[in-house]
């Protein structure tokens, strides 16, 4: 019971601590802005630098690193195990969080064994080429809404947003497809048959899924009439019929599903972990020791965080705290730092939730066979997303106010729910005589 | 056949992947939340743990151990008499029957006892032992038992796995009515104690049944139960 109340408290305190964290981040960003305008730099320079430092190097890296432990611990919970808990500081294992330090120490102190006939430059370049593109994706994700601050009589508009570029989503696609260089280079440069098999698998898989990844977001681009992610987020605050927020979740459920699957394939994690294929070929990073492997390992987790961030920005309302938004806005006052912090906290909480969802999916499904991966992409996702593009276009053409699109989207959602709920009992094991549940003999003693 | 495998073709709904995937994710989420909000019970009596909230079945091994079932052939022990000397009469039956030849005995004679021999050396190499239990069945005096309820503990050296009579002689003593030292008395046992032992001694065992080859209550399981009774929590 103690654990139950503790965990309820923990679950409640996560969004609250996210809000507090965002509040602190806004203050840091504002402070940097003050500093750079004192130095005489143009407006928002300091904010951008602070965002790079705090959001990308701080929030994303910390989340990704914590996910490496979180994955072990959460998978343990899924599989009725305990998970990592043997490193204790003062007798506390605190969810195995100290494994983070142990892992880093292990990676950094490992012997540097490298293949003899490697292509030296490309071999050294590959971990960076795998790491950087997935990392840089976060630059266009808006974490929090803009806040106006007065510095020396001039209004500076700062936001938790590293770069606001017109190309927005196109930048996402471009940077995401750069990530394939890292894997392909790692496979080729390490002069190993297994590694190149992994690299080739990675290339073909990622290039296939680029197509459906790009097409799945076309519907959202049309609906929100923008490529800038922050404008898409802003547009999702608009209410349909006066009560339903125009979330991508309602407008583009099919697009969301296809995007999520394609981006999942881009992260190269189970069930799409063919490039790694731990049980058959060890993967494109088989020849990489220590922290070079760690970079590729971490890149996967950063991709998980970035995918969660982009999904939540485009399909789940970004920094809009969706529930009780009006009440909160009136209580706190729009444009204040606290309101911005609540919004950014809501965004971070959504990102964490989606990271968790990805880990659950990763532990649900076994690996696809390679022909199944390609079939899923070319024969299923691509036709579906093409139909979705044309349907969305037609619906927006008929009804500019997006209400018809929302109706169709909700019908699609209901259809999906019904299909899932109509699960047959087919394939489940028949109850045998000795197949009694394992806890049946345990007496109810407390 | 453990269970029937159904290998039907996927119907349309199943070949759409997503409904079934969502359903599977739902099942795992349920399991996750269950283990997230409810920890596993830490009852030292492992068999009595309640798994209705969290189905977590992990045991933290060195600290928590599964009690072995009664009749488990554990580490050997030489059963002592009431006066602390071994019941063993150094007849070499166990050493002879041992298929792994891991028992070494040297016999000696007590100065105060004209009849009984005793083992000056009784050494079992636990690394060679195949835990067949033949020695227990061969023993005519019920002097060697495998009722300790524990397996051979790990060690860093081979020598530590060679158990001599000083380490083997342990556990509760056992008396039978036919034991010669009970019938004629022994210098190590006081007169009133002797009378008490004669009254409480077991009758002649008809065979090597579990009842006789096991010391009732001498097991790790009992230890765990006692720890629970004392209210120890780890």
Image: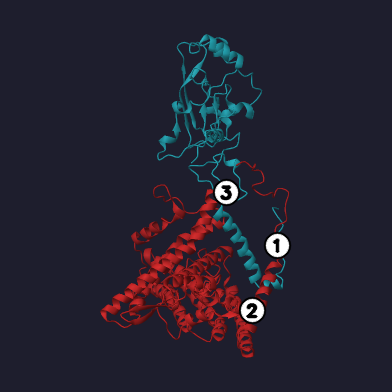
Chain colours: A red, B cyan
* Disc 1 with disc 2 on a shared chain: yes
In the image, A228: left or right of B214? Answer: left
| Chain letter behind tag 2 | A
Mark 1 lies on residue? A427
Element type at mark 1: loop
Q: Secondary structure at mark 3?
A: loop
In space, the residues marked 1 and 2 are separated at their CA atoms by: 31 Å
Q: Which residue extends farthest left?
A: A39
Q: Chain of mark 3?
A: B
Circles 1 and 3: CB atoms closer than 8 Å = no
Whether residues under marks 2 and 3 lie with C-beta atoms below 8 angstroms apart, the answer is: no
Residue B189: percent from the left, percent from the top?
A: 50, 13
- Spatial distance from mark 2 to mark 3, Cα to Cα? 43 Å
Q: Is residue B8 visible?
A: yes
Q: Which residue is mark 3?
A: B57
Q: Which residue is mark 2?
A: A409
Element under disc 2: helix
Side of A101 where B193 appears, left or right: right
- Residue at position x 54%, y 37% from top? B130
Q: Nearer the viewer, residue A56 or B168?
A: A56
Q: Which mark is residue A334?
A: none
């Amino acid at each position: 019971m103690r654990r139950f109340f503790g965990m309820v408290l923990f679950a409640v305190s996560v969004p609250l601590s996210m809000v507090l964290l965002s509040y602190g981040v806004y203050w840091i960003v504002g402070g940097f802005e003050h500093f750079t305008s004192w130095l005489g730099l143009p407006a928002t320079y300091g904010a951008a630098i602070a965002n790079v430092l705090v959001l990308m190097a701080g929030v994303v890296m910390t989340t990704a690193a914590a996910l490496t432990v979180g994955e072990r611990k959460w998978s343990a919970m899924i599989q009725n195990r305990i998970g990592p808990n043997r490193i204790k500081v003062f007798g506390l294992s605190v969810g195995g969080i100290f494994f983070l330090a142990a892992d880093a120490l292990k990676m950094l102190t490992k012997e540097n064994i490298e293949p003899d006939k490697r292509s030296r430059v490309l071999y050294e370049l590959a971990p960076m080429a795998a790491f950087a593109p997935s990392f840089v994706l976060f630059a266009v994700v808006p974490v929090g809404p803009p806040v106006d601050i007065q510095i020396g009589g001039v209004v500076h508009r700062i936001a938790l947003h590293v770069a606001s570029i017109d190309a927005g989503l196109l930048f996402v696609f471009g940077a995401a497809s750069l990530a394939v260089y890292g894997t392909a280079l790692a496979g080729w440069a390490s002069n190993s048959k297994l590694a190149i098999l992994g690299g080739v698998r990675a290339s073909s898989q990622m290039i296939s899924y680029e197509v459906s990844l790009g097409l799945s977001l076309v519907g959202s681009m049309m609906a929100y009439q923008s490529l800038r992610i922050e404008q898409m987020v802003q547009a999702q605050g608009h209410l349909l019929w006066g009560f339903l927020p125009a979330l991508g979740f309602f407008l583009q459920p099919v697009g969301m599903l296809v995007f999520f699957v394609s981006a999942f394939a881009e992260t190269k994690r189970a069930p799409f972990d063919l490039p790694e294929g731990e049980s058959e070929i060890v993967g494109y990073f088989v020849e990489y020791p220590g922290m070079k492997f760690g970079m590729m390992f971490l890149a996967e987790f950063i991709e998980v965080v970035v995918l969660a961030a982009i999904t939540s920005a485009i399909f789940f309302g970004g920094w809009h705290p969706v529930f009780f938004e009006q009440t909160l806005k009136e209580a706190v006052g729009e444009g204040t730092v606290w309101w911005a912090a609540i919004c950014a906290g809501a965004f971070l909480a959504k990102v964490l939730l989606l990271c968790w969802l990805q880990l659950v999916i990763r532990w649900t499904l076994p690996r696809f066979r390679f022909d199944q991966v390609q079939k899923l992409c070319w024969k299923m996702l691509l036709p579906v997303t093409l139909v979705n593009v044309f349907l969305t276009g037609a619906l927006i053409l008929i009804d500019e106010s997006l209400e018809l699109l929302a109706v169709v989207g909700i019908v699609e959602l209901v259809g999906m729910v019904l299909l899932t709920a109509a699960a047959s009992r087919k394939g489940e094991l028949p109850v045998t005589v000795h197949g009694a549940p394992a806890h049946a003999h345990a007496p109810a003693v407390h | 056949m453990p269970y029937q495998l159904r290998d039907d073709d996927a119907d349309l709904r199943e070949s759409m992947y997503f409904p079934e995937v969502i359903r599977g994710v739902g099942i795992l989420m349920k399991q996750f939340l269950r283990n997230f909000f409810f920890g596993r019970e830490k009852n030292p009596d492992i068999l009595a743990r309640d798994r209705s909230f969290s189905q977590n079945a992990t045991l933290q091994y060195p600290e928590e151990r599964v009690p072995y079932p009664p009749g488990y052939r554990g580490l050997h022990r030489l059963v002592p008499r009431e006066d602390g000397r071994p019941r063993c009469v150094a007849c070499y039956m166990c050493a002879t029957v041992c298929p792994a030849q891991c028992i070494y005995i040297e016999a000696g004679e007590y100065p105060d006892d004209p009849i009984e021999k005793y083992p000056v050396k009784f050494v079992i190499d636990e690394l060679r032992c195949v835990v067949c239990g033949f020695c227990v069945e061969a023993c005519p005096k019920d002097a060697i038992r495998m009722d300790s309820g524990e397996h051979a503990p790990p060690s860093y050296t081979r020598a530590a796995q060679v158990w001599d009579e000083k380490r083997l002689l342990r556990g509760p003593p056992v008396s039978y009515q036919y034991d010669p030292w009970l019938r004629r008395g022994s210098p190590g046992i006081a007169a009133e104690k002797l009378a008490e032992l004669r009254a409480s001694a077991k009758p002649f065992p008809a065979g090597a049944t579990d009842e006789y080859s096991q010391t009732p209550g001498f097991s790790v399981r009992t230890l765990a139960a006692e720890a629970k009774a004392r209210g120890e929590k780890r």
